[in-house]
Image (cartoon, rainbow, N blue to C red):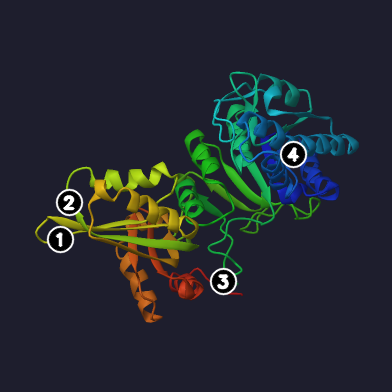
Amino acid sequence: MARIVVKFGGTSVANVERIRQSARHVKREIDAGHQVTVVVSAMSGKTNELVAWTKDAAALHDAREYDAVVASGEQVTAGLMAIVLSEMGVPSRSFSGWQVPIRTDDAHGAARITDIDPANLNELMDAGWVPVITGFQGVAPSGRVTTLGRGGSDTSAVAVAAAVKADRCDIYTDVDGVYTTDPRIVPKAQRLNKIAFEEMLEMASLGAKVLMIRSVELAMAQGVRLVVRSSFDDPDAPQIAPDGTPGVPGTLVCDEDEIMEKQIVSGVTLAKAEAKITLRGVKDRPGVAAAIFGALADQSIVVDMIVQNISDDGATTDITFTVPDSDYDRAIKAIEDAGETIEYSRISGSKGGAKISVVGVGMRSHAGVASSMFKALAEKGINIQLITTSEIKTSVLIDDQYAELAVRALHTYYGLDKTDA
């Protein structure tokens, strides 16, 4: 008997029929003798609707009341899931985050989980019940409901799995696993049997939308094994693992030590709408970088790639960085407003860049991955504007018009194409 936490995303609970389909996955695990706790998101589109209502009510509103409104989406789903499970003969009860309780700090709208008391959940599961918990929310020290920020249901599920010491946490979504790249760009993309936490973190931060970054960080810190799988699969079909053997389908996100044969490159990611900004002739003195990026941080602008080139005499430096296209104009203004503090000769930039990255834990033990990436792009006539690297990742900024060509070229170059596609 295993203890499993299963989480259903918005598309998996978009209406009552889909809730019923997802509930059949839960029943299958119960019938197999496992203990299960369910975590649910709001129905697809409902959170956006609730957020729009709060903004329509008042552009500047109390964040505590924002949480009170937005948290209602998951409460509806949890109640419906519990009703459907009970109708199927699976004893079930719904719980809001404050009833578990899932304790958080008081940062309304972007709260962080501080503690979960598992006693109530453990008692229910031991008695044969299935608790259905609202994801995305908890309770502040004041007793007010809090929300964790968009995508917080994944984080809720991982935190609950850690608290009840679950054997694994199954994240049900509208895709059947993590792929080597976006199958819409490369039809020959392969579903990965396993991927290391660090690889998944990099891919999530670089544009892959399968899992939220915070949930992967928490899973890695707590040692919670994740399985990404599809709620649209037939719940009554035999459980076949990606390697064709009986087991859990989907992609296992786990510790690197669980992966026997490590790929040099596990995936290729694409992030579009990247803007590039360059400051020329910046006075090279202590604190100048802090002044530049502090001015951007004050405007809540997220900076990604950063490259610095110091002049031969060491008196000045050029600094280039990227921000989302949507933040380009605000970033330029923030730098210009801080011009006297920063001291630079001129500023230039452009929108419409694309960041292409290759990711793989095998890069640690193989030399030449970056140079081979540059060679593959050069063979397609693709010019590289910026380069950044880490231990298991190499990223380049290129012109947006070559983005999909670059992804396809690199996917083939590193041998990631499915041979039967």
**Kind of residue sitting beneath label 2:** Asp
> What secondary structure is found at the residue carrying circle 4?
helix
Question: Residue 379 versus residue 55: which sits nearer the camera?
Answer: 55
**Kind of residue sitting beneath label 3:** Val
Identify the mark nearer the N-term, 3 or 2.
Answer: 3
Name the residue beneath numbered marker 3.
186
**Kind of residue sitting beneath label 1:** Ser
Q: Residue at x 36, y 56 (%)?
A: 305
Question: Residue 406 versus residue 283: which sits nearer the camera?
Answer: 283
Residue 25 visible in rendering: yes
**Measured Cα–Cα span from mark 1 to mark 4:** 55 Å
**Measured Cα–Cα span from mark 2 to mark 1:** 9 Å
**Measured Cα–Cα span from mark 3 to mark 1:** 42 Å
Identify the mark nearer the N-term, 4 or 2.
Answer: 4
Q: Residue at x 54, y 53 (%)?
A: 194
Q: Nearer the viewer, mark 3 or mark 1?
A: 1
Mark linked to residue 73: 4
**Measured Cα–Cα span from mark 4 to mark 3:** 35 Å
Q: Nearer the viewer, mark 1 or mark 4?
A: 1
> What secondary structure is found at the residue carrying circle 3?
loop
Name the residue beneath numbered marker 1.
311
